[in-house]
Each structure stands twice: as C-alpha cells, then as structure tokens.
Image (cartoon, helix red, strand yellow):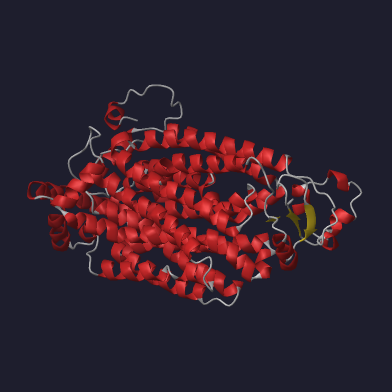
Amino acid sequence: MEGGIHGGTNTDGSSTFGDCFSLAWKNPYVLRLAFSAGIGGFLFGYDTGVISGALLYIRDDFKSVDSSTVLQETIVSMAIAGAIIGAAIGGWMNDRFGRRTVILIADFLFFIGAVVMAASPGPSLLIVGRVFVGLGVGMASMTSPLYISEASPPKIRGALVSTNGFLITGGQFLSYLINLAFTKAPGTWRWMLGIAGLPALLQFILMFLLPESPRWLYRKGRSEEAERILRKIYSENEVEGEIRDLKESVEAEIKEKEISEKISLIKLLKTKTVRRGLYAGVGLQVFQQFVGINTVMYYSPSIVQLAGFASNETALLLSLVTAGLNALGSIVSIYFIDRTGRKRLLVISLFGVIISLGILSAVFHETTSHSPLVRTTNTPLKAYTCPDYSFAGNSASWDCMKCLKASSPDCGFCASGVDKLFPGECLVSNDTVKNLCHGEDRLWYTRGCPSRFGWLALIGLALYIIFFSPGMGTVPWIVNSEIYPLRYRGVCGGAAATANWISNLIVAQSFLSLTQSIGPSWTFLIFGLISVVALLFVLACVPETKGLPIEEVEQMLEKRALHFKFWEKRTDPLDKTQGA
C-alpha cells in the first residue's frame, strides 16, 4: 500500500521551486494546507533552537545551573526526552485519531509548555515546561511532514515536505533573533522561551479550520469527505485517476488486514517491504543526529565561546550566522530535492560534513594546545588568584586551558589587557572577580580560551551547516514520509521519529560532558568518523524515491535487496527507474 498522493510520476527531474510558485498561482489551497501544517515544524525549530541562547542567561540567573554541566544538559535534553514520548505515541495517535487532531494536541502542549517555562521560579519547573514542549515537538516532528506528504501531488511532494524542513530551520533562526532582541530586556530568557506560545495559538486556529488528511479519511471509510478534499487539491483531469488509485490502495490494504488484524513489531520485520523501509528510514534518522547537528543547534553559542569568543552577546551574534545558513540550506533543499534526488543530495551532504568536522577537530586541537600562559602579576586581582594555581608545584607550565579545568573552586582566565593572547591571570570564578576583570577592560573566560584560530572554528561551523542542511537536514524526514506502505505509515513513522529523538537525546545529554572530558577536538573527530559510516550506509541501504508514486516505492523495496556492494552496477530494471 502507499501513503502519499498518487499522480503522474516525475521522472525527468524538472520539478523545482518554480512548480511551487506555479501551484500557488493555480491552486493556493495546497500551499495553505502545507504551510498551516508546517507551523508545527516552525515550533519544532523554535523550541529546540531557543534554548541555546536562553541557557547562557539561565546560567547567569541560577548558580546551581551554572556550576553543573549535567543540569545544563538536562535542561536542554528534557525537551528531547519529551519528544521521544511524543513521537512514540504520535505514531499510534496518527493512525487512530488522524493527522489534524494530533497537530491540534501538539499545539496545546506547545502553548502550555511555553507558559510554564516563562513563569518558572527555578530549574525544576523549567525542566517540567521543557518536557511539555518536547511532547509537542515529538508529535509535530512526524505529523507535520506526514500531513503535507498526504496532501501533495507527487511532482512537488518533495518540495512541499521540504517547506516543513525550511520552517524548522526558520524557527531556529528566528529563535536566535529573538534571543538577541531580549538580551537587554528584564527577564531575558523568560521572554525567549515564553513567546513560543503565540505561533502555537496561530496554528491551532488555522488547523481547526482545515480538513483531515484525505488518505486517512479514505482509510477510515469516509470516502466522500476524502474525495471532496482531493477535488480541491487536483485538477479535474487528474482527480478521477487519483480517487481510483486511492480506492484500489485501500481495498488492497483491507485484504491484508483480514489476514493479519494486529500490527506488531514481529509482523513489521517479517514484511519485506516494511523491513527494508525501516532499515533505510530509521538508519537515516539515527545518523542525522549522530553526525552532530544538534550539538551545533543546541550549543552553538557555547561552541563559539569554546573557540575563544568570551561575551554572551558576541556568541549569540556569531551563532546567528550558523542558524541563518541552516535556514538558507533548507531553501536550497526545496529547490534541489526533486531535481537532484534524495540519495545524491545525501551523499554530497555527508562528504561536506566529513570535511567540515575534520576542520573543526583540527582547529580545536590547535586552540586547546596553544592557549595563553598563566602568570601572576601585581594587579588588584592578585588577591583572587586560583588556589590550585597558587599551590601547584609546576605553575610555570600552566596555561588558560589548565586554569579552566581547576575545580576546587572553579577558576576563570582574565586575559591580558595588552593582547588577549599574552599571558593572563588564573582567578577564582565568581561575579565579583568577573566584574573586576571587565573593569580593567580585560576579557573574562570561563568556557574557552583566547585563540588566534577562533575565526577558523566559525568557518568550520559555517561549512558544516552549509553541507548538512540541504541533505542530512531535510532528506531523512522526506524519505520517511514516502517509504512506508499506507497501513504501516503511522507506526513506522513513529518508530523512525522515536529513533531520531533517542539519538538526539544521547547526543544532547553527552556533548558538554564529552567536551569537558576528552576536549572538543576529539569530540568532533568522533562525529566525523560516524559521518563516514553514515556515508557508507546511504550508499548501501537508501533507495532513491524521487518522483515515484508511493505504490512504486513499495514495489521497488519488494524487489530490491540491500545493496551493500554499492560499487557494483545493479542489473535490476527497476533500479533504472529509480536511478539509485
């Protein structure tokens, strides 16, 4: 069975951004469906991106957060933990109650979470609000692209589902702008987190006025409603063929349902097409996270500080560049996804990601191994010298990095006023010393050291985003909206989204701890090695679904064995159609 809208197959790769503009002129109803559902993607992006900047100010407000790396990671990752639950139950809810209903529930959760976070008196309630938001994110992450996919003609399906990816990255970009806008406002992070309630309210109203997915309606026996919606989506000369194909698809599904009433994991894995689809879909979602994207999106300002940029405002401003490039990459994806194809875009993306992570690893190695030395000088700050440095037998060998690793108590580095790369002072880290250091027009470092290589780290981050966003950023979601038979789409989509969020949680909860224990250089090197494995996986296991009606995707998976020897030319005639 299939799960996307049927129609003429686009095999010439001519479906581009221009087709969307043409559609907007001929039939704006389809775009209205896509963009209304896509606000879920916007909320997904905003709520996952905003915490990167808000965290800097939460640390300033709550000393318990500032002194605990684990608590910082928990505030970030509890939204992801909520998303795991949201994605897991979202699959079942999608099949039981419909795509539109799940989006409305997600909006309610987004709104409640935003209010709770904005009013939080301490870290505990803030974490509760993050869980609520996460539940909404998990549901929206799989339901928005599914709804769009099922209300899109095949020729522009990839482009319209990519608009969801664009709105995710657009939400992340706007979150950085909002962060910058509220840096001087009373309550800083409360405004940053609370303002997300507004788009949730907007989408709730818009989706309330829109219909359910025509595919879901047909599957539930509400064929008249489904046909009414299809007639709004397709032209008169296309709609009868679409209705006929959909009817055949649902009848075939009913026959299969009579054979097996219960969907179980064993049943899924025993069904060849579903099993092969899950290998590709779940694998892509896992690798999307394990190549390290959300270390950049959740901790971008912290990474910028590790690269040697001290102030919160500077870190946020520079992080805005990466968020902007991420949004731009999504636009590039909309243009190329139906022209270039899913698989080729993934391969190009991963090649660039590997190179970028290699640059980041090398730059941070140089940054950490050539940080400014520590010297005791006769300044008013001498009285606050770090105890570990004062009592060290080898204090002459101390540099900034060694100073920041001191823990009894925590210490910071006050850079030289002449040149930040000259020797500075290692001092006890507290607000008094920080203000005294700033009072002498010197920079205060607690999360990274001054470096002449900092700008190279920014270039590495920019390249990483430029390559990641158009391919690995959007294609996994598109493939997962296309690759499963209709009857299993909700369950399989939920399994893939859950795998994505579990992987996301592992990365988010471990990144700061990894950079502390083995350093950012080794951390990015690990992500680079995982990216090499991801590239081999894409070449061997991911089929090309460009322009194919979804019943043909199922036929392709039925005939296509996993192609581990990807360097050998395929002889299967179906492979010529799919261009894998």
Q: Quadrant of residue 95?
A: bottom left
Residue at screen point 34% across, 65% down: 102
For this view, does 202 lie left or right of residue 437? left
Question: Residue, x 34% and y 57% (percent of image)?
Answer: 144
User: With respect to residue 271, does 217 lie above or below?
Assistant: below
Q: Relative to residue 315, is residue 11 drawn left or right?
A: left
Q: Position of residue 185 (x, y in %)?
A: 51, 71
Q: Is residue 199 visible?
A: yes
Between 398 and 17, the one lying in front of the other is 398
- The extreme left residue here reads 237
Query: Of residues 375 and 298, which is closer to you in this image?
Result: 375
User: x, y (%) of residue 305?
Assistant: 62, 52
In the displayed structure image, the side of residue 295 where residue 421 appears, left or right: right
Q: Measured from the top left, where is residue 176 in percent x and y?
A: 47, 58
Image position of 320 with respect to 191: above or below: above
User: What residue is at 56 percent from the left and 74 percent from the top?
Assistant: 125
Which quarter of the image is occupied by the C terminus?
Answer: top left
> Is residue 376 or residue 307 the one in the foreground?
376
Q: Residue at x 42, y 58 (%)?
A: 174
Which of the pair 428/505 is nearer the observer?
428
Observer able to see residue 541: no
